[in-house]
Image: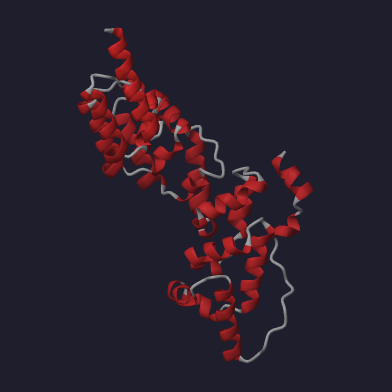
Amino acid sequence: MQACRFQLHYPQPLLKHPTTTPPIPKDGGLLFRQKLLYLQSLNINPHKALNLNPSLRSTPLSSLISLERSLSSVGLSRPSIGRILDMCPLLLTSDPLPPINFLLHEVSLPFPHLPLSLTRCPRLLVSSVPTQLRPTLLFLTSLGLVLNSHTTLLLVSNVENTLKPKINFLQSLGFDEPEVNRMVVRSPGLLTLSVENNMRPKAEFFLEEMEGDLEELKRFPQYFSFSLEKKIKPRHRALVEYGFKLPLSKMLKISDGEFTARLIEMRLQRVHKR
């Protein structure tokens, strides 16, 4: 159904490189200067781009113009195209159409959501479909994840070295495979966190300092996405100081002002009960 709607509203020719380009001078020096000026017009640092992608030196201007038109045809604005190309200069000499078609037809990402997905993760456009994107998609869908414009960035992660260690760590806490899968579906951001620098210290603080229950972590896996030093520790210690306890979601999801107000309210309620 997605592909049919796409064909009705966004014909496939939009995803083909344009073949017509403006006439350009034949002098090599002028051509190179014109290419540098073109990159600058997109707010791309030409020196950085040439250093990170030496192949760009021999790439004709017509190819760069064609690339811009291709990216524009999928809904990216010119400033967004410039930011993407400046962040990922390898794309200047790559074909973005295989990853784009993969996102549309295999991930089934709605066409209007494509610009946000690409802006959030330009690396998608230079990732190999058969060796990177497709195997990672199979792994993520095996967990039960349905990808959207916010989670397609997970597709550039290495399954063995990046994604599986997070799954294994959660299982080491005592959750079984179906429980871990449900936690990841509820909070896909878990797969973007460092085990050693983020997940392990937060789990240890929850289990040891807070004497928490794994059932609560299972219900609120978003716990791992909050700052340990700036939010979790100070709020827990404020509650302990007055002898209060709140569920993780009520303790962490509110703003600092709301938390302070709730703490005052609980203290007043205690006074009134005396």
> Would residue 88 be seen by someone viewing this image from the given angle?
no
Q: Residue at x 52, y 71 (%)?
A: 44
> Residue shown at 51%/57% (left/top)?
122
Q: In the image, is 157 to the left or to the right of 22?
A: left
Does residue 260 appear in this view? yes
Q: Residue 114: x percent and y percent?
A: 61, 50
Work out which quarter of the rendered image holds the N terminus and state it: top right
x and y, in percent, of residue 147 in the image: 54, 40
Residue 255 position, x and y percent, is 40, 34
Who is closer to the viewer here, 85 or 8? 85
Instruction: Please give the name of the residue rendered at 26% of the width and 24% of the height, measured from the top-left corner.
Output: 239
- Find the residue positioned furthest to the top: 274
Count of picture labels: 0
Q: Nearer the viewer, residue 79 or 268?
A: 268
Give the vertical position of 44 relative to 84 (above or below): below
Q: Is residue 142 left or right of residue 272?
A: right
Q: Check the image and tell me how it is coloured.
A: secondary structure
Reply above or below: 44 against 166: below
Residue 34 pos. (x, y %): 60, 83
In which image quadrant can residue 243 be found?
Answer: top left
